[in-house]
Amino acid sequence: MTFTPVSKHAIVVGAGMGGLAAAAAVSGHFERVTVLERDALPLTASSRPGTPQDNHLHVLLIYGQRALGELFPGFADDLARAGAVPIRLNLDFREELPGFDPFFPQRDMGWVFYAMSRPLLEFVAQRNLQKLSNIAMRDGCRALQIVAGKDGSAIGVRLETNDRSVETLPADLVIDASRRGALSLSFLEATGRPRPERTDIGIDLTYVTTTFAVPEGSRNWKAVVTMPEIPASSTTGYLVSVEGNRWIAVISERHIEMPSADPDEFMGRMQQLRTSTIYDAIKCAKRLDGIHRFSTPENSWQHFERVADFPRGLLPIGDAICRFNPIYGQGMTVAAREACILKVLLTKWAGATDPLAGLGQAFLSAIQPLIADAWSQSAIPDFAHPHTRGEPPAGLDNSLRFGKGLLHLAGRDPAVHQLMIGVRQLIKPRSALGDPELVRRVTSLQEYREGRSPLKSHF
């Protein structure tokens, strides 16, 4: 690797997708990069204790796949070679929505994303990272605290190894890619800075997952989602092809007690979905795994960008800043794109006298539009559920009504369909849906469907 480093040593805390992407982003700008991970990293694509939700369905959106391709050239090909399943949007995807069973037509958008288990995705990223000569992966190391210098800057990490020995590892930059950003929050308090303001949306989401062997037989889809009639129900079903000729089957629901791990109960709940597509597919299939359960009470956005005098040498990223509702698949994509933004900033500032001065503030400012766009996209459907807690987005009712009209227009117009999918995949910003002509057409069609006006030409 040939590069001009901006500094000597960067530490990344956490070897999840956010941490792996961040390590790749800074690898071309530091002489050494050390990734600290509490778990023992597996030698194959397998689960680990530090990610108790990794048995569940994870989605890497198109925008995230492209971001990882920028950080790890050829990443999509690596996924394919590892067994990830290519899915053509929207041709291989059956989307069952109230009034659309399925959404039709299933057009080919010209985009391919890969479906895989989270362990496979992380394993492929780890292998790519380990090819870089200046990267050190230290597993079995628990980060205890971020060390503060006399000026209140971050200067290293105090860690504990599996043999209970404690050491302090100095660094010029500490990237906190832990799940909740606890290290960054503790560091701010220890250096006399306030905790960041936080925005929460209480979703009380539970999801239950297992895997099946894909039986023989032809079908015109590789993934199915069955959506409920909101607000009468929140029960959603997913069935997605992944590596190893397997299906991951998921049931998600809101504001209920955690379901049991009984396989018969799982099948019974699948049978109660709004359509029978998923149940019919798995009722005679061989189950390969136990029933895995997980819950998440809230989406949480910590506004580090509002902290005055943000400390030099500290950089939270990914889930340490914002935890999204997992059913929309935004978390890993946003983290990967944040890493790309960090890489661009470091490249831009490489020739500066002090390239790390103000890096934290600049990074946190630069990623706000990305986070805000993904957050707003999930907040609107989240607040369609009446028991969701928090402050609803302004104009919620109009946004929900617009979404219904947009869906019907997308069924008629391939260009609108492509735009809608592009926004969902974060390829396009949500602001693209605010085009005045598009708004006029959606409004006209929705008013007609509600019986409030005749259908105008060129709706």
Image (cartoon, rainbow, N blue to C red):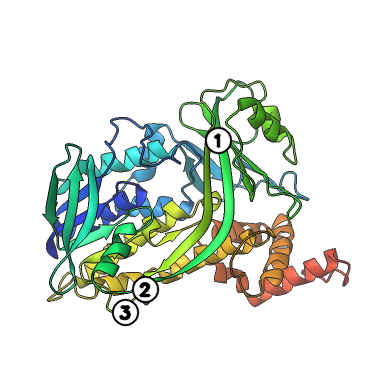
Q: Nearer the viewer, residue 117 or 417?
A: 117
**Which numbered marker is on residue 168?**
none
Task: Specify the amino acid type for callout 1.
Answer: Thr
Judge by depth and name the residue closer to the eye, 81 or 207: 207
Q: Position of residue 418 (x, y in %)?
A: 60, 57
Q: How many angstroms separate mark 3 from mark 2 (CA)?
A: 8 Å
The 10 Å Cα crowd at callout 1, few under 14, some 14 to 19, many 20 or more, is many
Which label belongs to residue 209? 1
Q: Is residue 426 visible?
A: no
Q: Quadrant of residue 7?
A: bottom left
- State which quadrant residue 193 falls in: bottom left
Kindly identify which residue carries mark 3.
308
Total labels drawn: 3
Residue appearing at x 29%, y 63% in the figure = 186
Tag 3: Cα neighbours inside 10 Å, few (<14), some, or many (≥20)? few
Calculate the distance from the C-alpha at mark 1 to the C-alpha at mark 2: 36 Å
Tell me the amino acid under the disc marked 3: Ala
In the picture provided, is 21 more to the left or to the right than 157? right
User: Three-letter amino acid code at disc 2?
Assistant: Glu
Above or below — where is 91 with respect to 361? above
Look at the picture and state if 332 lies above or below 147: above
Q: Could you tell me which residue is drawn at 65 percent across and 77 percent down?
A: 436
Q: Quadrant of the C terminus?
A: bottom right
> Is residue 25 something that shows in the picture?
yes
